[in-house]
């Protein structure tokens, strides 16, 4: 399994865990300040990691350059010069 695929499954599993924690959170931890603090910190860290991963476009740009090289720097429909080509 590739690193990208593993990351996707990690995020999906994390979402399921938090979904499963909804009932205990409402029933047993409804008055717990510590639980709210942990959940808030976790949400902030997770969103920052997600934003950093989304901002890292190296893999997309590498694939785009590979496709442009295969096309010879020209648009297959009209023959116009592609960006950066």
Image (cartoon, grey):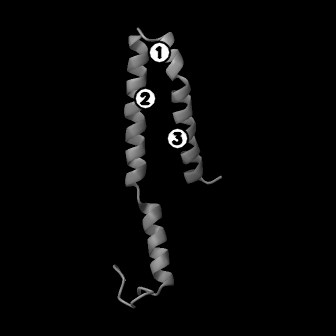
Picture residue at 45% right of the left edge, 72% below the top: 64
Asked which secondary structure carries label 1, the reply is: helix
User: How far is disc 2 from disc 3 in space, using C-alphas?
Assistant: 13 Å
Given this view, does label 2 or label 1 mark the residue nearer the observer?
1
Residue 30 at x, y = what percent?
43, 11
User: How far is disc 2 from disc 1 in space, using C-alphas?
Assistant: 18 Å
* Badge 2: residue crowd in 10 Å (few <14, some 14–19, many ≥20): few
Q: Are marks 2 and 1 in contact (CB under 8 Å)?
A: no
User: How far is disc 1 from disc 3 in space, using C-alphas?
Assistant: 23 Å
Whether 85 is drawn above or below 14: the answer is below
Residue placed under numbered mark 1 in the picture:
26
Q: Are marks 2 and 3 in contact (CB under 8 Å)?
A: no
Whether 21 is drawn above or below 72: the answer is above
What is the number of callouts on the image? 3
Residue placed under numbered mark 3 in the picture:
11
Q: Nearer the viewer, residue 72 or 80?
A: 80
Q: Residue 16 occupies which quadrant of the picture? A: top right
Residue 56 at x, y = what percent?
40, 55
Residue 42: numbered disc: 2
């Amino acid at each position: 399994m590739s690193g990208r695929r593993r990351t996707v499954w990690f995020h999906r599993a994390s979402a399921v865990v938090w979904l499963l924690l909804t009932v205990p959170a409402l029933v047993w931890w409804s008055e717990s300040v510590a639980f709210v603090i942990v959940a808030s910190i976790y949400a902030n860290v997770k969103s920052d990691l997600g934003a950093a991963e989304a901002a890292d476009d190296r893999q997309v740009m590498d694939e785009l350059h590979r496709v442009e090289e295969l096309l010879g720097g020209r648009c297959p429909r009209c023959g116009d010069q592609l960006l950066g080509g």
